[in-house]
Amino acid sequence: MRRLTRFTRLPRTLDAATLTWLALLALTLLGVLAASQGTAGATRLAMAWAVAALCALKARLLAAHYLHAQEAGPVFSVLIRAFALLAPLGLAASALREWWLG
């Protein structure tokens, strides 16, 4: 008779935190793939903007599922969402500046 331990049992369903973590992992891998594709010019700009968009999506997932921004008061919720947009906007602006200056 086979004895089951806590290491051999698998959960029947994944909880929201695990699904969010898996989504963040997939988005990170997509970001790494996108960053490795652009080498120069408009292709590099497009890939940098793709990475910025992935970063914004990851920030939304973190704010919604880990920080629970929707449950915070309206002022705190706006502050969390605004702060989460700083990195993607900075990435996009930096890429545009790099492309513009050549």
Image: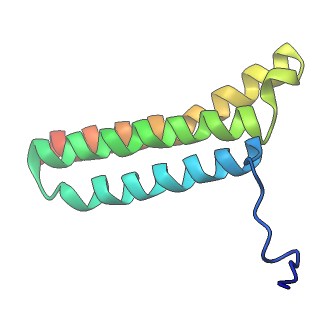
Residue drawn at x 56%, y 36% is 86
Q: Residue furthest top?
A: 74
Percent x, y of residue 22? 59, 52
Residue drawn at x 36%, y 38% is 92
Q: Is residue 77 above or below residue 53?
A: above
Q: Residue furthest front?
A: 1
The one nearer the camera, 14 or 47, is 14
The one nearer the camera, 22 or 70, is 22
Residue drawn at x 11%, y 41% is 42
Query: Where on the picture, by quarter, is residue 96?
Result: top left
Percent x, y of residue 98? 23, 47
Q: Is residue 64 above or below residue 12?
A: above
Which image quadrant: the N terminus?
bottom right
Colour pattern of the rendering: rainbow
Percent x, y of residue 85? 56, 32
Percent x, y of residue 74? 83, 14
